[in-house]
Amino acid sequence: MLRFILEDTAAFARRWRALALAAQNELRPALAELGAEVADAARALAPTRSGRLRASIQVEPAADAVQVDVIADAPYAAFVEFGTLRRPARPFLAPALQFARRRLDLLARALIRAWA
């Protein structure tokens, strides 16, 4: 049987918060770079008629979270991505995210190894 006794919970809580803050500080720039790569890939994959859809693809980092949103805010972007009853889907965001998913996995593993 394995038993852990945590006697100094305040010190543990301080260290845990410091670790979380360090993770956020390391992740934010990496996620911003990854978000830019996803946006570039989405722009390359987006069908072009007028160029408006490609121009609407942008990266929005969250101010208070470790998060990056890649959005296409053209009014018809969802219709292109998912299709309609009359038009087949022509996905550009989902494949771009799949492209970056492997890099995100490698980034997470590297951070875990660095703190282990």
Image (cartoon, rainbow, N blue to C red):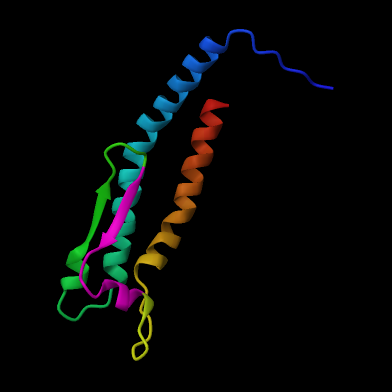
Q: Residue at x 45, y 48 (%)?
A: 104
Magenta-drawn segment: 67-81
The picture quadrant where one finds residue 22 is top left
Q: Residue at x 38, y 76 (%)?
A: 82
- The outermost residue toward the top is 8
Q: Is residue 19 magenta?
A: no
Number of marks:
0
Q: Is residue 28 left or right of residue 111?
A: left
**Location of the C terminus (image quadrant):** top right
Which of the two residues, 45 or 78, is positioned nearer the viewer here? 78
Q: Residue at x 49, y 53 (%)?
A: 102
Q: Is residue 20 left or right of residue 47?
A: right
Image coordinates of residue 46 in percent, x first then y, are: 28, 72
Image coordinates of residue 61 in percent, x first then y, are: 27, 45
Q: Is residue 79 left or right of residue 4?
A: left
Image coordinates of residue 40 in percent, x first then y, are: 28, 60
The picture quadrant where one finds residue 43 is bottom left
- The outermost residue toward the right is 1
Q: Is residue 79 magenta?
A: yes
Q: Above or below — where is 61 with respect to 114?
A: below
Which of the two residues, 58 or 62, is positioned nearer the viewer here? 62
Q: Residue at x 21, y 68 (%)?
A: 54
- The outermost residue toward the bottom is 86
Q: Above or below — where is 6 with respect to 100?
A: above
Image coordinates of residue 112 in percent, x first then y, are: 54, 33
**Location of the N terminus (image quadrant):** top right
The picture quadrant where one finds residue 98 is bottom left
